[in-house]
Image (spheres, helix red, strand yellow):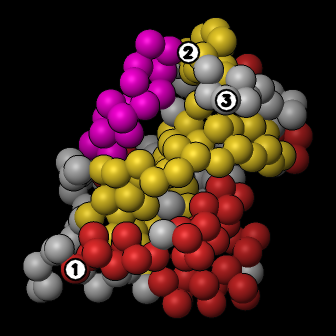
Amino acid sequence: MSEDLLIVVDERDGAIRPLARAACHRGAGVLHRAFSIYLFDAQQRVLLQQRSAQKPLWPLHWSNSCCSHPRWGEAIDAAAERRLIEELGLHTPLRALFKFQYQAAFGPQGSERELCTVYVGAAEDVGTVNADEVAAWQFVAAQELDRRIAADSSAFTPWLLLAWARLRSEHWPEITALSQALPVR
């Protein structure tokens, strides 16, 4: 894991102190700030990425379009924009919809314990994909993703499972409006 200094937070997302990325993910994890981005095309398909085999936590699992952490001293909106460019070579406006907190262990390798802001945006394709971060990617219809999750949820990251359920149940009209604003190809 990179030794970026992440932002340890309290339950209300108040910054407490910086902590190295590896330390944030060791054992049961330390609560830290994170974000997950879900990009949709004009057909309301979501862009999924398969995490690189080099990832220490959930390698080769399918996840949302892009996810990461702001660095100590970095605003979360700026971090989301930065990582979208670094991972997928994309720049698109993002909108924060909600936050959620979770903890998930990946065996002895470590855990995620995050207060995660969920962003949505629009994209019709990817740019230059960073192979150190992403093994594969695909646009998937919402009903197809629902079917895949029901068939084998272990193929997906835990944060995707949690956020996707909430996107589908509470925020689908916003995603429909976002997708309808895009030109259909």
Total number of numbered labels?
3
Q: Position of residue 177 (x, y in %)?
A: 28, 75
Which residue position is annotated with label 3?
A: 12
Query: Which amino acid lies under the numbered mark 1 shown in the image of this protein?
Result: Gln
Q: Can residue 109 be found in the magenta stretch?
A: no
* Tag in front: 1 or 2: 1
Query: Which amino acid lies under the numbered mark 3 shown in the image of this protein?
Result: Arg
Q: Is residue 3 above or below residue 134?
A: above
* Tag in front: 3 or 1: 3
Which residue position is annotated with label 1?
A: 180
- Residue 167 visible here: yes
- Residue 136 visible here: no
Which residue position is annotated with label 2?
A: 5
* Tag in front: 2 or 3: 3
Q: Residues within 10 Å of mark 2 (few under 14, many from 20)?
A: some
Q: CA distance from mark 3 to mark 1?
A: 34 Å
Residue 140 vs residue 128, the one in the foreground: 140
- Quarter of the image where one finds residue 134: bottom left
Q: Position of residue 142 (x, y in %)?
A: 48, 83
Q: Residues within 10 Å of mark 3 (few under 14, many from 20)?
A: few
Query: Which amino acid lies under the numbered mark 2 shown in the image of this protein?
Result: Leu
Q: CA distance from mark 2 to mark 3?
A: 20 Å
Q: Position of residue 103 (x, y in %)?
A: 79, 44
Mark 1 or mark 2: whose residue is earlier in sequence: 2
Residue placed at 36% from the left, 63% from the top?
39
- Quarter of the image where one finds residue 1: top right
- Quarter of the image where one finds residue 139: bottom left
| Residues tagged 1 and 2 counted as in contact (Cβ below 8 A) | no
Range covered by the magenta-colored residues = 70-86
- The prevailing secondary structure element of the residues shown in magenta is helix
Element under disc 2: strand
